[in-house]
Amino acid sequence: MVILLYKWLLLASTILGNGELPTSKTAGARHPLYISVTEMEHNATEKSLEISCKVFTDDFEKTLAGVFKAKVDLTAPADKGEADSMVRAYIKSHLLLKVDNKAVTMEFIGFEKENDAVWSYFEVKNIATAPKKIDVTNTILYELYNKQMNLMHVKVNGNRKSYRLNYPDKEVTFAF
């Protein structure tokens, strides 16, 4: 997964940037892209849709601070409950799903920091049969960056489909 994300970032930075790959001098100071990655997988055994969202920590903290008008530290939060609440509320209001034309509610599992990114985890229960269609509205970090890209990977019955939304585009349908 990390290798796949790294390849996407290198490809996108080469295409969107000046054609040069980021160097250790530029990569450490600021990442060249504003990107999130959302992965969804139907778990037939658990009868659920498992969702994970990966966002660069600095961008996510800046966005949450603006939205909630509070100081945000996702690396070492002073109040883990408050951090959970902000992450849950933000993602649930910026990632909306319909499964087979029915709006579904994502249940928050938690979040964790991994290197320079934050993973947040959600689950939609009672998805007994493999979805034929998943409609996604994704506006993660759209209020902060007009160059935001949101990558999505959806896997149902071993069939994986991917799509990239570029600001201001926000909706995509995955059909299986």
Image (spheres, rainbow, N blue to C red):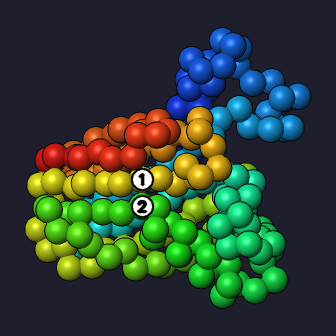
Q: Secondary structure at mark 2?
A: strand
Question: Label 1: how many residues lie within 10 Å, few (<14), some (14-19) or many (20+)?
Answer: many
Residue 102 in the image, given as x and y percentages of width and height: 17, 68
Position of 44 compared to 70: left or right?
Answer: left
Look at the numbered discs 1 and 2 and tell me whether their residues touch, using CB distance below 8 Å: yes
Q: Which image quadrant for residue 83? A: bottom right
Q: Amino acid at mark 1?
A: Asn
**Residue labelled with disc 1:** 138
Residue wearing tag 2: 95
Residue 91 falls left or right of residue 77: left
Which x, y percent locates residue 90?
54, 69
> Toward which corner of the image does residue 78 lie, by quadrant?
bottom right
Three-letter amino acid code of the residue under disc 2? Leu
Q: Secondary structure at mark 1?
A: strand
Tell me if mark 2 has few (under 14), some (14-19) or many (20+) residues whose alpha carbon lies within 10 angstroms of its own: some
For marks 1 and 2 on the same chain, the one whose residue lies earlier in the sequence: 2
Q: Residue at x 74, y 72 (%)?
A: 69
Please give left or right for residue 65 compared with residue 93 in the image: right
Residue 18 place in picture, x, y as percent: 69, 13
Q: Residue at x 29, y 67 (%)?
A: 49
